[in-house]
Image: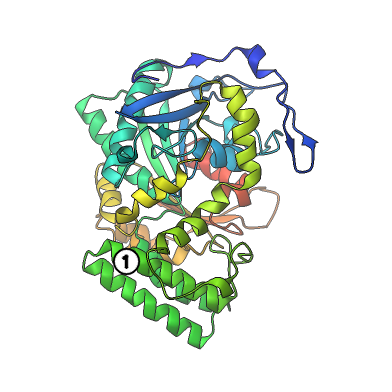
Amino acid sequence: MELGRCSYPVPRLLLLLLLLLSLNGGAVLSWPTEEGKEVWDYVTVRKDAHMFWWLYYATNPCKNFSELPLVMWLQGGPGGSSTGFGNFEEIGPLDSNLQPRNTTWLQSASLLFVDNPVGTGFSYVNTSDAYTRNLDMVASDMMVLLRTFFDCHKEFQMIPFYVFSESYGGKMAAGIGLELHKALQEGSIKCNFAGVALGDSWISPVDSVLSWGPYLYSMSLLDDQGLAEVAKVAEQVLNAVNKGDYMEATRLWGEAEMVIEQNTDGVNFYNILTKNTTVPAKESSLEFTQSHLVHLCQRHMRHLQQDALSQLMNGPIKKKLKIIPEDYSWGAQATNVFMNMEGDFMKPVTSIVDELLEAGVSVTVYNGQLDLIVDTIGQEAWVRKLKWPELSTFNQLKWKALYIDPRSSETSAFVKSYKNLAFYWILRAGHMVPADQGAMALKMMRLVTQQE
């Protein structure tokens, strides 16, 4: 697993083996008999830090993979697994029951799933000091991986390369996108970087927190008293961020979530039409201590590593991949990844988005209508703060409606686009847009990658 070792094509016969796993009361899962070309490998990005990636070549019946873009997908958390959740729960060729997904993005792009930061998913570290602690380290590690990947897979160097992301993955995608742009200018990486797409992304955390109260109030999920309580703690978060006290801002962020849980009877932060039943609001306490990180980690990581997905990844998937260390389990270090990034959580990266736009990099922002943790109101707030010279023209444009089926009058999304900035409002979707609205997410990806 040394730096620079190129991946190997997996023999098709291996992919046709039946991988059996008893799940959900003894149900047997079998591996489908038709799969496209896949490769995967580790890259040692630093001493004691090993990052895992998994590539699927596009399987469009009318086009060769070389005629379609390459999309890298980055999960949130931090600590959420791209090769697990993004792959099997959102956009990969198979769902978590190993059945073909009708809305897989693989029909329109090759897909590169990367478990980052190190310690996420099948990625791992050998020593506790090898975890990343900020966005700079995350981006630096990814540059090592991408340099190795494109050196070993020269067939992708000229193909348009997009970084799509979700949640905290969007924050990482912004930082990675800027560093990749710089690396291309320096000539240290060879690829055709075409843009970033920031989905329900934690770009300006304080703008999200400040918008929670008004959003929930407008949806009849807070009364006047609840709105006042949420507004009070949100103002405290803002003050901590303005002072640059990001550790305190993180603690107060957690407190704000507890206030919301108590006042909404446990609303789900990832889809306001559902309820958070895992940890009842009654168990919450505003006497917040050092355990606030544990509460935050449990709330924002558990949906990414549910038991069924963990069993899938540590069972048939680990057996298929063959290169995962025997003594390591998928997701085993995820909590440590989350904890080590504490000082980075509440830092905004709006200025990085501005730098990307100024550099001419295509930036797409997309958001689910029913998301709370990164609600659309908060996204619109930080977009309005951009210093991009073309912003006033962008703001004056009228959005246009999008339809999954041109024969239907049902609106699926709205979009506004000008030069290298686009914003998609995805209707009837929560935090995980592709999981909730798979067909619309696929259409959006095709629009962003200029296939429609």
Three-letter amino acid code of the residue under disc 1? Ala
Expressed as whole percent of the image width and height from the top left, the position of residue 417 reads 42, 51
Expressed as whole percent of the image width and height from the top left, the position of residue 230 reads 44, 78
Decide if residue 35 is in sight here: yes
Decide if residue 432 is in sight here: no
Question: Which residue corresponds to the image point at 32% horizontal and 24% vertical from the top-left?
Answer: 147
Rendered view: 384 above or below 91: below
Considering the numbered disc 1 on the image, is that residue within a helix, a strand or a loop? helix
Count of numbered labels shown in the rendering: 1
Which picture quadrant has residue 203? Answer: bottom left
Rendered view: 284 above or below 244: below
Which picture quadrant has residue 316? Answer: top right
Expressed as whole percent of the image width and height from the top left, the position of residue 362 reads 36, 42
Rendered view: 79 above or below 216: above
Which picture quadrant has residue 100? Answer: top right
Residue on which disc 1 sits: 249
Which of the pair 15/248 is nearer the observer? 248
Which of the pair 438/80 is nearer the observer? 80
Query: Image check: 274 left or right of 149?
Result: right
Query: Image check: 119 left or right of 36?
Result: left
Query: Image check: 378 left or right of 393?
Result: right
Question: Which residue corresponds to the image point at 47% horizontal and 82% vertical from the top-left?
Answer: 227
Which of the pair 120/294 is nearer the observer? 294
Q: Residues within 10 Å of mark 1 (few under 14, many from 20)?
A: many
Question: Which residue corresponds to the image point at 57% horizontal and 76% vertical from the top-left?
Answer: 264
